[in-house]
Amino acid sequence: MKTTYPVTFSVDFPDRDLDRVSTAFRIFAVIPIGIILSLLSGASIRYVTSTNGTNETVTSVATGGGLLFLPLVLMIVFRQKYPRWWFDWNLQLLRFSNRVTAYLGLLDDRYPSTDEEQAVHLDLPYPDARQLNRWLPLVKWLLAIPHYIVLFFLVIGAVVAVIVSWFAILFTGRYPRG
């Protein structure tokens, strides 16, 4: 399929009988790989301890991709470079994240691999950082606010669709079409 979009993403339809037991307990089965994903993708952990109600100790830990975000933005802004190895890391992390999301969303009943493509296909072209507006990363998040509002409602619809699919797989053993 030839497309003019810069991002190509697809998930193979599971046109086979799915494992009902793994579907029933998917929320528990995803915990180990979800921990790995959160450690790699930049999740932050915050611990708050209170001794007598007035003194609080706050400890925050940022992991993985969260630590790699700011240096990349600074490199694009000031040097107009996006190293190929950094792009490859981000692309593989996105692919892994999408495999875990597809597994959690019942689109695949095979446990997500950390290195194989499986049923989720994602491809991005390598960008030329010299063609990017060097100051746009500093304000681009403002332009995303309407997008996040629309995504909020789309996520609600996706959660409802996953719940309906969960029941369909439990009763019929197949993912519903259409």
Image (cartoon, helix red, strand yellow):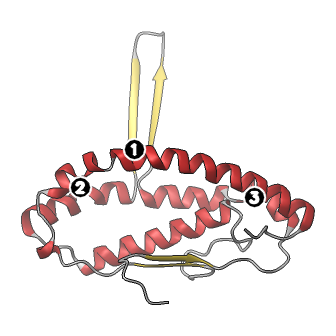
Residue 131 is situated, as x and y percent measured from the top left of the image, at 13, 74
Asked if the residue at tag 3 contacts the one at tag 2, i.e. Cβ–Cβ closer than 8 Å, the answer is no
Residue 70 disc label: 2
Q: Nearer the viewer, mark 1 or mark 3?
A: 3
Residue 92 is situated, as x and y percent measured from the top left of the image, at 44, 75
Residue 33 is situated, as x and y percent measured from the top left of the image, at 61, 62
Q: Is residue 94 above or below residue 37?
A: below
The residue indicated by pointer 3 is 26
| Kind of residue at disc 3 | Arg
Would you identify the image quadrant in which residue 102 lies? bottom right
Residue drawn 69% across the image and 68% down it: 107
Q: Residues within 10 Å of mark 2 (few under 14, many from 20)?
A: few
The disc, 1 or 3, on the residue closer to the chain's N-terminal end is 3
**Gap between marks 1 and 3, in whole Å?**
28 Å
The disc, 1 or 2, on the residue closer to the chain's N-terminal end is 1
Residue drawn 84% across the image and 63% down it: 169
Q: Nearer the viewer, residue 77 or 107?
A: 107
The disc, 2 or 3, on the residue closer to the chain's N-terminal end is 3
The residue indicated by pointer 1 is 61
Asked whether, in this view, residue 91 is left or right of residue 151, the answer is: left
| Kind of residue at disc 2 | Leu
| Kind of residue at disc 1 | Val
Would you identify the image quadrant in which residue 72 lies? bottom left
Asked whether, in this view, residue 51 is left or right of residue 29, the answer is: left
